[in-house]
Image (cartoon, rainbow, N blue to C red):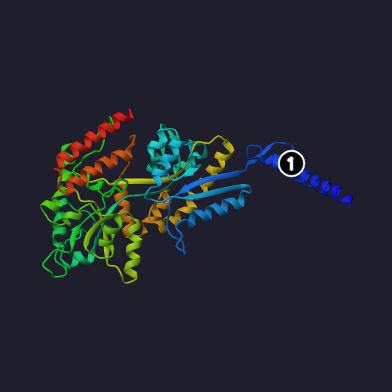
Amino acid sequence: MCRRPFILFLCAMLVVTTFLPGLLTGCHNGKKKTKEGSEETWQGVITVWDFPRWPDKNGNRFGWIEKKIAEFEKTHPGVFIHLRPLKWEYGLIELRAAATAGTYPDIAPVAADYDFIIEGYFEPVDEYFLPDELKRYEPRAIEAVTYQERIYGFPWFMTTYGLFINREMFQAKNAIIPENGLWTYDDFACALQKVTYDKNKGGKIDCYGFNLFLSPGSYQVWGFLTMDGAKIFDEHGNFTLNTPEGISALTKLTELEAKYKVVPTEEYGALEETRVWGDFCEKQKIAVYPAGPWAIKVLNDRYKSGKGFEFDLMHYPKGQNTPSAFALVSGYTIFKQQNDKKKALCAEFLKSITSENEQEWLAEYGVFPVYTEALKKAENDPLIKRMKEILDIAANLPKVKKWHKIDEAVIVQVRLALLSKKTPSQALEDAAKTVETILVGVH
């Protein structure tokens, strides 16, 4: 019996001598040491916040990123990547709040967000690109994540908006469908008049030519606001959408209700996205709807299943000038780091998931690759080629501070104009006053 304490003592010593060195090593700034004491690699947890993407075979919209994380962890023992799923509705709000509070993740898909960049939240990542690698990118993709000649992210995809039309409704009403996808505003309005009618013969219009989703962060309307040549900002950073060109373009939008009666009056720009998309895609209550290239696959799948309709893709209508939609670039960025080896691992992970080899998956997501060669291959589909034509003349988002607030200020006033609560001139003048207040607050 007296031998038991001694045996327990030996067991305790064995545990200490076996595991204590590993514990001490693990507490040393997350860096693995060799026997000689030289640093090998960083070990620890990398946090990634990301939005849902295309669904996998199980319907999981985070399946792609989870697979990439598992592959990276397998080849990097001791490195663990924690994924926090975000929601599109308020994910950006969460990221902005986390940045302000200093509780931001290591990685997030906001590389082209100008406010984050100029406020110093991101790590520059120029060192992780070779000159030959940069040459393979679409120039606008790199430009979107560049500030003062430094690169702050890894571009992943690009997208824009075009006008999807219900070909069957157009053909049934003998409305002209431009073969090359180009039409003037007058052609556009004339076609919308023909496809606005009483479908159910109930004595009331129940099918309309057009509607759109109007909300900050959704850029469907901007291709219309530029159709008479208006610029949002001049070269000095002054807001200029309230010029005669901008006012005339907004007037054309309001006349779709006031003059041509081709939109649902009380619902014009006032519905939630799922509702107005459903009116176009499922109920076929509207004939034209602005959307991104993601809609091509969705509408194709519905048509093949027997639930959809023949559709086509058009440019935004030309007014006094060629309209320009927004080109939206998405990419991943690294938030500020205290450990260079951890930053290098973050960069290695992001280069792998945004590489040319990964660009083929973007077709599933309905967006454009950021590599020039991959972008050319994507043009095999006629509708993708048409959307690429729109992308080619689209402009990147303005690089101005508080753009998200400016976008919101403009959208609020545009909605009031569409609902006939303000004249186009008054709406854009009020928008200009709000934007000026925002910009003064920034300075």
Q: Which element type, helix, strand or loop, lies under badge 1? A: helix
Is residue 128 something one can see in this rendering? yes
Residue nearest the viewer, comparing 203 with 257: 203
Is residue 151 something one can see in this rendering? no
Residue at point 13% right, 69% down?
202
Which residue is at the far bottom?
306
Task: Estimate the x, y position of residue 92 in percent, counting from the top left.
Answer: 39, 44
Residue 358 shown left or right of residue 143 in the figure: right
Rendering quarter of residue 176: bottom left
Residue nearest the viewer, comparing 16 with 33: 16
Residue 68 shown left or right of residue 163 in the figure: right
Task: Estimate the x, y position of residue 436 in percent, counting from the top left.
Answer: 25, 32
Task: Estimate the x, y position of residue 329 in percent, counting from the top left.
Answer: 38, 45
**How many discs appear?**
1
In the picture shown, does residue 177 fall above or below 305? above
Rendering quarter of residue 241: top left
Residue nearest the viewer, comparing 356 with 416: 416
Which quadrant of the figure contains the C terminus?
Answer: top left
Dot 1 alpha-carbon crowd within 10 angstroms: few under 14, some 14 to 19, many 20 or more:
few
Task: Estimate the x, y position of residue 403 in percent, counting from the top left.
Answer: 32, 38
Residue at point 89% right, 50% down?
3
Which residue is at the far right?
2
Q: As shown in the figure, which amino acid type bears the numbered disc 1?
A: Pro
Residue beneath disc 1: 21
Residue at point 34% right, 34% down?
401
Residue nearest the viewer, comparing 433 with 399: 433
